[in-house]
Amino acid sequence: MTAAAHRVVIVGAGFGGLAAARALKDAPVEVTVVDRMNHHLFQPLLYQVATALLPPGDIAPAIRDVLHGQRNAKVLLGEVVGFDTTGKHVEVVLSDGASRELSYDTLVVAAGATDSYFGHDEWREVARPMKTLADAIDLRSRLLSAFENAAAAESAEECDRWMTIAIVGAGPTGVELAGQVAAMARRTLRKQFRGLLDPTRVRVVLMDAVDSVLPPFSPKLREHTKRTLEKLGVEVLLGKKVTDVDGDGVVYEPGEQRLPARTVIWSAGVKASPLAEELAKATGAESDRKGRVLVRPDCAIPEHPEVFAIGDMISLDEIPGVAAPAIQEGRYVAKVISARLAGNPAPEPFRYNDRGTMATVSPGDAVADVRGLKLTGLIGKLAWVAVHLAFLVGWRNRAAVLFKWAWLVTTGRRSQRIILEPAHAQKITRTHRS
């Protein structure tokens, strides 16, 4: 690559950023992918790491491994903390704490989203989110520790508190977690805690302020999902707004009702990455109420055609913040960049090709809306499997994940039941407020 090559800096190696980098493989550019983690994360399967089904490496290939065959791409491990659109560089803090200015000719920002606690960030310590690999591994340890603590409890009341798992948020992540936790308790752990725990006493409670599970889905699929979860033993509490969370449980409206639970999982909302705000300040772009940057139809920032933003951190035509749009946006932006460099007309404005939405409900059931076709049960599950395997990066990961799914269906066993911290480190300060 010559020194005069067009420099494309891509911030973030999620679905959008990685898609953009790979789509520029044959372009006359020098691509630098910057991410604060060294791996690409397949977030739709994080809950399966949290529920001891998949090992972390199966859904998180190293970025350098993914791009190792791309001669015009390099990777920089560091966190972008600022933008200088006048000098055309980004400020990066490297893993050793040193700062570096990274120059660009074209900038693509794909920083993703983070959890939203709706102004109650103090809940994060006890209501764990699930956006990163570390979150999922931490949650796995907390879930497994809860069952160990229940087995060691000296009273039925204490045992019940440990065996109650509260999941706040009834969107796809909450639904998928609830189904897997219920299945893990009743099938997998039943054999491991024989004589110590009655798996039928495990309470998995899925709660949300909205009046249905999976709000974006059709009424038919929502009803099927709720019915299937209840058959699994999940308690579905809808129309319940959480007003407080502490180490002993959840307080919710209407009224000041309390759900005693030693494990609380948060999947109730997301907001744009803090980097979206930094980008808006640097470019003068507008943001919506979720902090997402408003972009032009070609995904460029208004008044800054050399700066693109894609994925969960942008607001464009009410496109949902899921993997498929981010991938399509990444590939589209790569086409725009290539067309500009070749002196060709710009592509048509970005248009999302919605191929459907889906969510798994249990190890053998999923719901899917594919171009108006409503799928449930085994057929829905097969569609869900096909799509998720297609989106996974790398054939080794696909084969490993498919094998572990087949192993679970056949035996009910989960091979990743590892608690990483010693018992004394698993304690959470109890802050029950009467």
Image (cartoon, grey):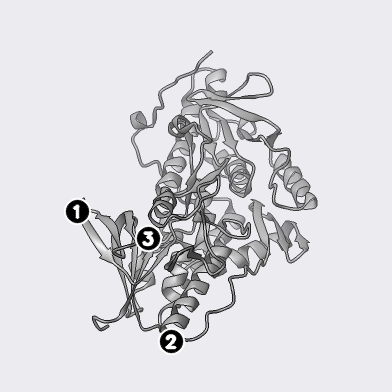
- The label nearer to you, 3 versus 2, is 2
> Where does the image place residue 2, in percent across and percent down from the top left?
25, 84
Of the image marks 3 and 1, the number of the one nearer the N terminus: 3
User: Label 2 amino acid?
Assistant: Ala
User: Label 1 amino acid?
Assistant: Ala
Q: Nearer the viewer, residue 271 or 315?
A: 315
Q: Are marks 2 and 1 in contact (CB under 8 Å)?
A: no
Residue 29 in view (yes/no): yes
Instruction: Give the CA separation, mark 3 to mark 2.
Output: 32 Å
Residue matched to label 1: 98
Residue drawn at (49%, 78%) of the image: 335
> Where does the image place residue 391, in percent across and percent down from the top left?
54, 67
Residue matched to label 2: 342
Q: Are marks 3 and 2 in contact (CB under 8 Å)?
A: no
Q: Is mark 2 on a helix, strand or loop?
A: helix
Dot 1 crowding, Cα within 10 Å, few <14, some 14–19, many 20+: few
Q: Please say if 271 is above or below 252.
A: below
Residue matched to label 3: 39
Residue drawn at (39%, 27%) of the image: 427
